[in-house]
Amino acid sequence: MTMAFDPKLFEPSPEPEIPPGIDVEAEIERLRRTRNAVILAHYYQAPEIQDIADFVGDSLDLSRKAAATDAEVIAFCGVRFMAEVAKILSPDKTVVLPDARAGCSLEASCPPDEFARFRRAHPDHLAITYINCSAAVKAESDIIVTSSNAEHIIRQIPADQPILFAPDRHLGAYLARRTGREMLLWPGVCIVHERFSEREIVKLKAKYPDAPVAAHPECPESILTLADHVGSTSSILRFAAETPAKTIIVATEPHIIHQMRKVRPDKTFIGAPGADGNCNCNMCPFMAMNSMEKLYVALRDLKPRIEVPEDVRVRAVQPLERMLEMSPKGAPATDLSMIGEHRETVSADSPVG
């Protein structure tokens, strides 16, 4: 089932007018220094943005990396909820998002007022909430989780404690199967991972019989049953690097393949297609709203700024801190030291989740 969303949700901000003769990449480098800025890029960003970023990775670890720097400005090339997490963890830093309209279907599927009513209707349930949600929803939650630490955290919850899980119903259903826990699921979905086609993946597996399928747990169960590896983006990246297979079918947003090719240029990576056999429909339209030109203007003008009301921020910090307390310790990080000479790729499968 694909959820219906307002078409306006997918409209990016107009590309800014750049004066003739401006070298955008050079200006970004200059502004990075003069603004004392750190540039973060999620794995789902366009390759040119990944390549100019100081850190490339998953949302939470990117925010924690930025918080640990002495940067005064964080330019988060991702989507709004990710930039909000950066602001929650670094309230004294200026946080900018290149395109203010870069949202998320999971965030949009879980409005804070509706989630608050849902919680009030189930007061005996513990609210475990996927990090892909707004700051206001985080503030209404008991524990925040990522796709890499959710199972570990849920296994620590007493068996007699009812759980509600939001906003991704596919991730929630996957975790319920993995842990044997019944959970009340919010009906949200990621539009990217909903679009993968079981039929098209079966065709690919027939064409490449030795190629394993690596899938994100935001995919529907029909896709996950075909997968040889299910995990977060960083987990998929590590699997792609470490598996002896020379060809890998990748069922997540295809821009992560840019990092896979950097790590293992000797391998072939095939993006899982949608129902029409075309993988382009599986590119995140929200991640695509950012551009090099918008990043330049965001650093130049220090806007669009991300602000989180202090009362919301304080309440949202608490479930994030509880997540960190309950996350696995000593989990292996992805070894991607070969990427770049002065950039860094970070992993959400690190001990902090």
Image (spheres, rainbow, N blue to C red):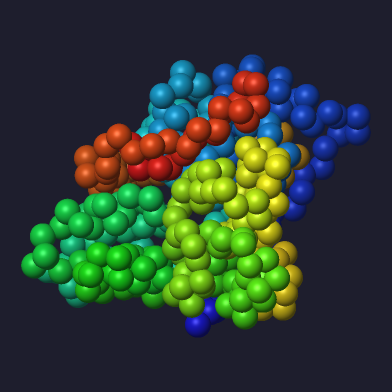
Front residue of 171 and 81: 171
Q: State the residue at coordinates (51%, 71%).
A: 226
Residue 195 x, y percent position in the rendering: 60, 73
Q: State the residue at coordinates (56%, 62%).
A: 213
Front residue of 125 and 244: 244
**Residue 199 falls in which quadrant of the image?**
bottom right
Q: State the residue at coordinates (70%, 42%).
A: 266
Front residue of 305 and 131: 131
Q: On screen, 5 above or below 126?
A: below
Residue 289 x, y percent position in the rendering: 67, 53
Which residue is at the far right? 20
Specify whether residue 42 is in view. no
**Residue 133 falls in which quadrant of the image?**
bottom left
**Residue 282 falls in which quadrant of the image?**
bottom right
Which residue is at the far left? 160
Q: State the residue at coordinates (86%, 34%).
A: 19
